Amino acid sequence: MEMIRFRFSKLHAVVVAVVVLTAACGDGGAASTTIGETTSVPPSSTLAPTIAPTTPPPTSTSPATTTTTASSTTTAPPTSAPTSLPGDPMDFGPRAGDVLGVVGVAHDDVLNVRLAPGTDQTIVARLAPLEDEVIALGNTRQLPSSIWYEVDADGRRGWASAAYLAYLGDTSDMTALLIAALGETPEAETMLDLGQIVAEASASDDPASRIVLSVAPTVGDLGEVTFDVIGLGDDSVFGIRLHVFGTPSEGGEGFILKSVEQTVLCGRGVSGGLCV
């Protein structure tokens, strides 16, 4: 079965209109620039094959696990932040106590939380791709090519790249809008292909969205897969998370779209489930 191809433009316009229809302007903002700040971890043997990422692979060489065997000549990493933090303070960003979620991190990666802003700083914690209880501490700093938020990650204080953190807004059913935009119900050979169709239909060409497989495909009575689409050209909507469900086609040779649940990812804040 050949995977359906199509342009995104109609659905992308509808998606952005839906998520910002009743949203009001707010203070602050989030950055979309970063340098490789996720660390790949070995995929589980139960995960389905993943798609090639749409951005260059992370450059971090940190091990995926949190335990290492140190030689007698190594020294312990620092346990307190430098007296003078890298970068410059910024007046905008999440307020102290705001709850953020990890976004745009591949299913087999983690988001590093570091002792201070910068990819050369010591890692103090690692966050899973769907972590949704990251507490902002109200401090933001800008480096030449990235912006960092100070956060509390499971009781560990540290700094994480703003390019991988957002407010989680409402979740809604986008199935009818997607099918209307495509003119037909999409189907594909695998759930991975079906999810890619939905993600590409929801993405932006200018600016080009970053499409990330955040939950690998699973198949039971229904197939499921989740993609994050980051960057839609809207200053309040950071991106969207798409949870795609498929029904096995007759003969078990593919999947037909059953439904799409969309969670809006907000860059500046959320009020009543809507981006502000």
Image (tube, rainbow, N blue to C red):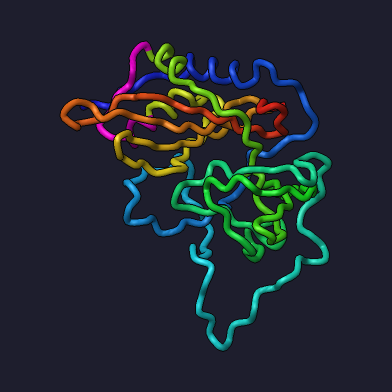
Q: Quadrant of residue 245?
A: top left
**In the rendered view, would you say 65 is above or below 193?**
below
x then y, percent, for residue 15: 54, 20
x then y, percent, for residue 233: 61, 25
Apparent side of residue 68 relative to residue 23 in the rendered image (left or right): left
Q: Quadrant of the N terminus?
A: top left
Can you name the residue that lies furthest to the bottom here?
72
x then y, percent, for residue 109: 48, 53
Residue at the (44%, 41%) spot, across then down: 213
Is residue 117 in the magenta section?
no
Q: Is there any visible trace of residue 210 in the rendered image?
A: yes
From which residue to which does the magenta span run? 183-196
Residue at the (52%, 31%) spot, across then down: 209
**In the rendered view, would you say 212 is above or below 73?**
above
x then y, percent, for residue 34: 62, 46
Q: Nearer the viewer, residue 127 or 77?
A: 127
